[in-house]
Image (cartoon, grey):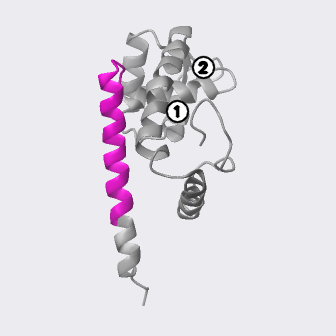
Amino acid sequence: MKRKPSTEATAAWIRLMRVQSRVLDCVEQDLKKAGFPPLAWYDALLELSRAPSGELRPVELERQMLIPQYSTSRLIDRLVDEGLASRRECKVDKRGQFVEITEAGRELQKRMWGAYSAAIEKYVGSKLSDADAVKLSNLLDRLGCSCGEVKLPPVGVNESMPSR
């Protein structure tokens, strides 16, 4: 017989889900108040800007997103319509395509980072000491290691964008 989660593990799960949802909602509200598009736009632009040539296949972009994105093609359509990304055909596989960040996309992603980083500080950084943030990151790493996620950089790496 398989073991069931303890009451404590279940309570931790519920808190994790509630906090994640509430913090993301607050960040989205702050971005909206600052006149920016949704966080998914930032996330997509960040992933494209991090790609070696500034481009990814749509399926790669979806896999890299921080936020679950079930409608990647619509998100890509919006980015292309706004001139923040462009599509191009894959020369090797004519059926495939790449999504490439534009200069306007790079600029928007950098401008959004100001509001996004302020929200991260407001909802996380101001509530945890750096030591607590390291402990929380290490605990979350333990939860994510069996989910097949991308390996995260060591805690404490200070970048101008959130590390993954």
Residue at 46 percent across and 27 percent down: it is 42
- Tag 1: amino acid: Leu
Judged from the image, the secondary structure of the residue bearing numbered disc 1 is helix
Residue 118 on the magenta segment: no
- Judging depth in this view, the residue of 84 and 39 nearest the camera is 39
Residue at 33 percent across and 48 percent down: it is 21
- Tag 2: amino acid: Cys
- Judging depth in this view, the residue of 143 and 53 nearest the camera is 143
Q: Residues within 10 Å of mark 1 (few under 14, many from 20)?
A: many
- Judging depth in this view, the residue of 118 and 58 nearest the camera is 118
On the image, the x and y values in percent for residue 69 come to: 39, 38
- Residue position marked by numbered label 2 in the rendering: 90
Image quadrant holding the N terminus, namely bottom left
Q: Which residues are drawn in magenta? A: 14-37
Q: Residues within 10 Å of mark 2 (few under 14, many from 20)?
A: few
Residue at 31 percent across and 40 percent down: it is 25
Q: Is residue 150 above or below residue 11?
A: above
Image quadrant in which you'd find residue 6: bottom left
Tag 2 near tag 1, CB within 8 Å: no
Main SS, magenta residues: helix
Q: Is residue 105 above or below residue 49?
A: above
Residue at 47 percent across and 13 percent down: it is 84
- The answer, for residue 72, to whether it is visible in the render is yes
- Residue position marked by numbered label 1 in the rendering: 61
Q: Nearer the viewer, mark 2 or mark 1?
A: 1
Image quadrant in which you'd find residue 35: top left
Mark pair 2, 1: CA separation: 15 Å
